[in-house]
Amino acid sequence: MAVDTNLDSATKTLTIKISGRFDFGVHQDFRKASEQASNGIKTIVVDMGGVDYVDSSALGMLLVLRDKVGESKDAVRIKNTKPDVCKIFKIANFDKLFTIE
């Protein structure tokens, strides 16, 4: 499991790339990455192309991240989700809270 970040100061976009299992085991790394969201970031992109598994703690981490940047559906964009992960997001109605690409 890994969490990598990239901050584009020109567009004020923070990209958080997660690989492996997105569960409580990445909580500390994800929290550190999300702390960058308070520095005038307008958009956060969560790249989940390398994620095969999410659990309820991952869903909670995404909700906390959304609270940091605002309630707008476009503030946090989740991209590159695999079909099984996307299915979990839809069951949890995350497609109503986030832009899922």
Image (cartoon, rainbow, N blue to C red):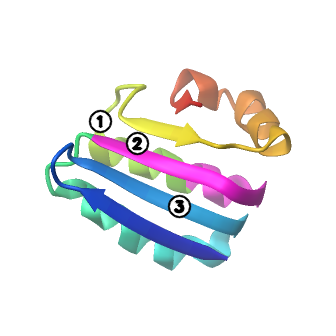
Spatial CA distance of label 1 from label 3 is: 20 Å
**Magenta-drawn segment:** 43-60
Q: Are marks 2 and 1 in contact (CB under 8 Å)?
A: yes
In the rendered structure, which disc, 2 or 3, sits on the residue that comes first in sequence? 3
Residue 66's disc is 2
Residue 17's disc is 3
> In the depicted view, which residue is nearer to us: 20 or 55?
20
- Residue for point 72% across, 59% down: 51
> Is 75 situated left or right of 17 in this image?
left
Label 2 Cα crowd, 10 Å radius (few <14 / some 14-19 / many 20+): many
What is the secondary structure assignment of the residue under circle 3?
Answer: strand
> Is 19 situated left or right of 37 in this image?
right
Residue reaching furthest to the top: 96
What is the secondary structure assignment of the residue under circle 2?
Answer: helix
Q: Quadrant of the N terminus?
A: bottom right
Q: Quadrant of the C terminus?
A: top right
Q: Which residue is mark 1?
A: 70
